[in-house]
Amino acid sequence: MKKNLFNNVDLRVLLLSTFLCLPFSMKADVTFVHKYVNVIVGESFIIYPKSDSNISSEYKCYSTFIQQYETAFFTISEYTRTKVDRVPWYNNMYIEGYYCSYKVTAQKTGESEIVMGVSTYKKGNDGLYPQSCYVKYHVTVSEKPKVVSISIPNTLSLKVGSSYTFTPIIYENGASTSLSWSTSNSSVVSVTKNGKIKALAPGTATITCTATNGVSAQCLVTVSPIYVTSISLNKSEVNIKEGDNITLVATISPSNATNKDIEWSSTNNNVAIVGTTGTVVGISEGTCYIKATTKDGSNKSASCLVHVEKKSILVESIVLLPTSNTLKVGETTTLIATVSPQNATNSSLTWSSSDESVATVDNNGKVTAVSAGEVEITAIANDGSGIKGTCCIIVSPILVESIVLNQTNAEITVGTSMTLVASVSPINATNKNLSWSSSDSSLAKVDETGMVTALSKGKVTITVTANDGSLTSASCVLTIISDEYEGDLVFDYNYDTKEATLISSPNQYSGDIIIPSNVKHEGMNFLVTALGDDCFYQCSGLTSIEIPSSVTSIGEGAFSDCNGLTYIEIPSSVTRIERWTFRDCSNLTSIEIPNSVTSIGGAAFARCKKLTSIIIPNSVLLLLKIMLFLLQA
């Protein structure tokens, strides 16, 4: 049916088209343009009446419209709409104009026409000049090309894991169709909607490509496996004990082999067995091979040599005796280790000390005490059982047992110093540090080295004490004398030689006399070198005399008539004994003349009635005088 759309045209268009608008200078012109279109049924195309018309460029288009078409052949709808400048109307009024493009869809095959109208105008000096153009589209609608056949490979061979994409050839040319793809066995070969296949497992599958009109093509795909090319084990030789196990790991190449299953076997199940995962268990002592063989038909294999050894008997306990001990520094003791059970395969031990600065231990358990403290001695089994035994060793110090001073009594002059030397026993005492003290620090002070400094006259005790807690000590009694001699003895001073000679006193000497070796007089020190003549003459109250080693000579009659003397010691410094020295010492019983004496005066021992023993050295030269003495006695 032809459809005339005149009644649907905008009234403005009709009026202008029939020249009922503002006065025109002349009637409108009408032209026709023919266009030819070929289209496939079901497809669409766009028509542009304005641009397809032959209207001169001086005319302005203000409207397009559908004039006539067959609805059985086409459906038509606006595609685009474009506004134009305002169009003059009567009485100085304006209307809005527009032109369109149209979408045409072919509905059936055959030939038909579409008539489109285009309205234009131009301004003249005496009014508006309209012009209309009709565009007649001669449309031939053809059938769609049909797929006659599809070409894809008839057969394909793939390996598992590989892919392939089909590129189908479609006949006849120009046919438009969509293709669908399917597989007869998706577990063997999968296919995507774009025709890409992937080999999944060994086997065959038929791939079908189908057009929308039912035309199809098929390809038989054969998938072959990827065979194992080599197999290796992580160990080629192992040692295990009875009852122990080890797992062998097999590596297969290539890594993408289709069937990686392995069959494990032992050449001697009495020696060792193997499980399905490669775990080998030692059964009894001996040697066998464990073999891994592929199951994909490639017959690849690898072997491991297994040595099964007797099972070890591990140590279960270690007891150290004694479990504790106390040693002194330097002492040693040997610990006795008892290992159980007695038939342990490896009963050797490793010994260690928790603190080798306190005590050390050797490979035989011999412990040596090094310093005071507490330490743990450990013996651990070497068989890997981790069993150990321990002994607590307490190391005590070696205490000081005695201290001996080089002097226990000494005389020191005010203002002078002396050093006491202490000897500690035993010599291996752990702590030999000593502390020094003075019983009266106003008389004498002592430093940490034992050096004593006399401060004033008197008697003081210097004590040295061990610092190790033993409380062991030793003492020295010091007699501190004035630097100026203040005794009862009388001296004759030689200011040239700085020597002093003991002389007699108006008051007789008595009692126990100690003669100093040095005396200070008028600020000067004098060495006592001689006992003057008659210095102790008739001193019957003299009971003992101590002569210093500084004296070299004893004067005439020095001890004459000293009836209270029973014994006298002459120092080895004396070289001369003058005459009458001991005359009338009636109670003198013995005397020893030192080898230093080279001269003895006459009658030196006259009337010494109780003198029963006298030793005269060979050094004496004046034998004649001695003989005289013996005759007089």
Image (spheres, grey):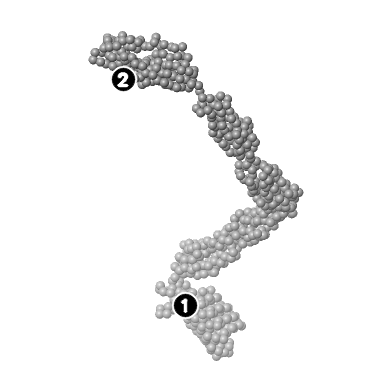
Residue annotated with mark 2: 56
x and y, in percent, of residue 369 in the image:
62, 59
Q: Relative to residue 152, is residue 360 depicted above or below?
A: below
Within 10 Å of disc 2 (Cα), the crowding (few <14, some 14-19, many 20+) is few
Point 40% across, 15% down: residue: 115
Viewer-nearest of labels 2 and 1? 2
Amino acid carrying mark 2 in the image: Ser
> In the drawing, does residue 327 fall left or right of residue 242?
left
Tag 2 and tag 1, C-beta contact below 8 Å:
no
Point 27% across, 14% down: residue: 128
- The earlier-in-sequence mark between 2 and 1 is 2
Q: Relative to residue 302, is residue 12 depicted above or below?
A: above
Point 65% across, 36% down: residue: 203
Within 10 Å of disc 1 (Cα), the crowding (few <14, some 14-19, many 20+) is many
**Image quarter hosting the C terminus:** bottom right
Q: How many numbered marks, from 0 up? A: 2
x and y, in percent, of residue 84 in the image:
33, 18
Extreme left residue here? 125
x and y, in percent, of residue 329 in the image:
61, 60
- Residue 455 seen in render: yes
Q: Which numbered dot is residue 528?
A: 1
Q: Relative to residue 58, is residue 369 depicted above or below?
A: below
x and y, in percent, of residue 462 in the image:
52, 64
Q: Relative to residue 111, is residue 333 depicted above or below?
A: below
Q: Which numbered dot is residue 603?
A: none
Extreme bottom residue here? 624
Looking at this view, is 289 or 468 the one in front?
289
